[in-house]
Every structure is written in structure tokens, then in C-alpha cells.
Amino acid sequence: MRDWLGDRVLIALTALAALGTVVVMALIIYRVLHGAHLAFSSFGLGFVTGTTWDTVHNQFGAGTLLYGTAVTSAIALLIGGPFAIAIALFLSELAPAGVRGVVGALVEMLAAVPSVVLGLWGILVLGPFFANHLEPWLHSWFGFIPIFSGDPSSSGILIAGAILAIMVVPIIASICRELFVSVPQDQQDAALALGATRWEMTRGVILSSSRPGILAALILGLGRALGEAIAVAQVVGAATKINRSLFLPGDTLAARIAEQFQGAVTKLQISSLFYLAAILLVIGLGTNLIALAIVRRFESQRAGV
């Protein structure tokens, strides 16, 4: 009787927890869509491509912010992705046991650093370094490319992308490390026994068999970069137009919401910010669903289904 009652209580509690997650997600979606109703009725789908954000004349569009979100997230993956994969390979295959524990803990602790602290570090350290050293060097060598033209600045899209790269590294590195560790040791030993070098074994066995999982990890990192607000708002510059140069200020969907929601003065402006949140929610859910589908397909292939 006691076992029967315990089973029923366990089922009820876990079912309620699962249902609670669904209810919370549904309430978030409802509140965001309800808040965006006025802006959607005023601007329609044209809001997505509109590039004007004028609080004085109540003209709003998300085009500039979508551009900034896409570019900063792409920079984050281009910089952080290879670093994270390299860290995961070092920790899983090359590092001595003592070093592995220390470095692994430090990488995981990086995920615990508050985003506002990273933003302050970007303002005080990374921004001046980029403005005085990296951006002048990029301009001198690659200034003929539009994205590296313009005057160096201590705030802008490039710096925001670099901050996001730091934030996505722990996520991607942790997932990739688990993927690399799960590769059967027999396959690695067989490749080495056949005369493959360590690099050839890593490329042909570890990276090849983990490729779908690596892609899923990158997409999850992308989701993290897309939704970051505070750190980006501190360094991106809050521009209201699309600038071709990465040195110049920009803005993102999440950063604009963080910057203006508390100070919004009209109902249409507030609704437009909710519209931005709705776009961000769709993008975030989409990236996570894609990553989940890739992981499930990868698991099915490994299981031979």
C-alpha cells in the first residue's frame, strides 16, 4: 500500500512539474503576443523590415536591430566556436589529469560570471584595447573591406560580438567535451594502430563522429548570443541605423528592450518593444528546436535506428 501510494505521489508531482513548465511557457508567449498586439496592428509584418526607430514620431521598425543581432551573434560564433571546440579537445584528449580538472573548472566558472560584469569589463578593458590596438590594425590591413572601414571606437558591433563570444564559449565547450569523451576509445585506438597521427585520428574519428553534436552545440551557443541583453547594451553603442563598419555602434533586439522598456513613454513604443520580444522569442525557440532535432537525429544514428 505504501509503495502504491508513493508511486502515485511521484507520478503526480513529476506530472505537475512538467505541466508547470508548459503553463509558464504558454503564459510568457501569451503576455508577449498580447503586449505586441498594438504594434502589430499598426505596422504589421512591415515592422520586421522597417529601419526607423523614432520615439518622437512613433515610427518603429526592427530591421536595424535584426541586423545588429545577426552580426553580433555571427561574430560570437566565428570567434567563440573554434576556441570552444579547441578547449574541449584539449580537455578531453590532450590535457594531463591535473590540468584538466583546473582548466575545466575555470571554463565552467566563466559561465557563472554575471553578464553585467562582463559588460563592465568590456567598457573598461576590451573597448580601449580594441580602439587603440586591434581595430587600427584591422583598418590598416583590411580597411578596403567595408566592414573594417571607419574610425576605431571603444564601443561598437565588433566589441559586442567579442563579449558574446566569451559568453558562448562555456556552453559550446562543455557540450563538445561531453561529445568527445563519449567517442569509443576502441575507435581511437584502431585509428592510431593503423598508423594515423594524433591529428588524423582527431579529425577522422573524434570530430567526424561528433559533427552533428558540434553543430547542435553551436546552435545552442547561438541561442545564448541572440538573447543576451545587458552586456551587449553596455558596449554596442545603441545606434539607430545600419552601419557597414563593425567599428561603429549598432544595436540588437534584446539590448534595445533592455535600454528602453523602463523609459518608454507611449503605448505604441511599449508595444513595439513587446513586438521585438516576440521576434526574439520566435528566433530563440526556433534555434533551440533545431538544436534539439539535431541531437535527437545524432542519438538515433548512434543507436542504429
Image (spheres, helix red, strand yellow):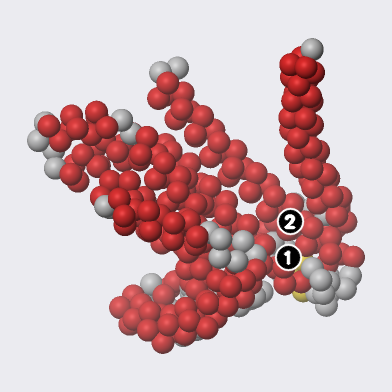
Compared to residue 290, the image places residue 10 above or below, namely: above
Horizontal side of residue 39 vs 253, given as left or right = right
Is residue 25 in view from this perspective? yes
Crowding at mark 1 (Cα within 10 Å: few <14, some 14-19, many 20+)? many
Residue 284 to residue 266: above or below: above
Q: Residue furthest left?
A: 195
Nearest to the observer: residue 237 or residue 121: 121
Q: Position of residue 303 (x, y in %)?
A: 42, 21
Percent x, y for residue 159?
Answer: 50, 73
Indicate the amino acid at tag 1: Ile
CB of mark 1 within 8 Å of CB of mark 2? yes
Q: Residue at x 81, y 71 (%)?
A: 262
Q: Amino acid at mark 2?
A: Ala
The residue that mark 1 highlights is 257
Q: Tell me which label, 1 or 2, sits earlier in the chain.
A: 1
Query: On the image, numbered disc 2 is attached to which residue?
Result: 277
Where residue 177 appears, x then y in whole percent? 39, 45
Where is 139 relative to 267, above or below?
below
Tell me, for residue 162, which label it has, or none.
none
Residue 278 at x, y percent in the picture = 74, 52
Q: Residue drawn 49% across and 34% down? A: 295
Residue extending furthest toward the right: 267
Q: Residue at (65%, 44%) from the top-left corner?
A: 285
Q: Secondary structure at mark 1?
A: helix
The residues tagged by marks 1 and 2 sit, at their Cα atoms, a distance apart of: 7 Å
Please identify the quadrant where the C terminus is shown: top left
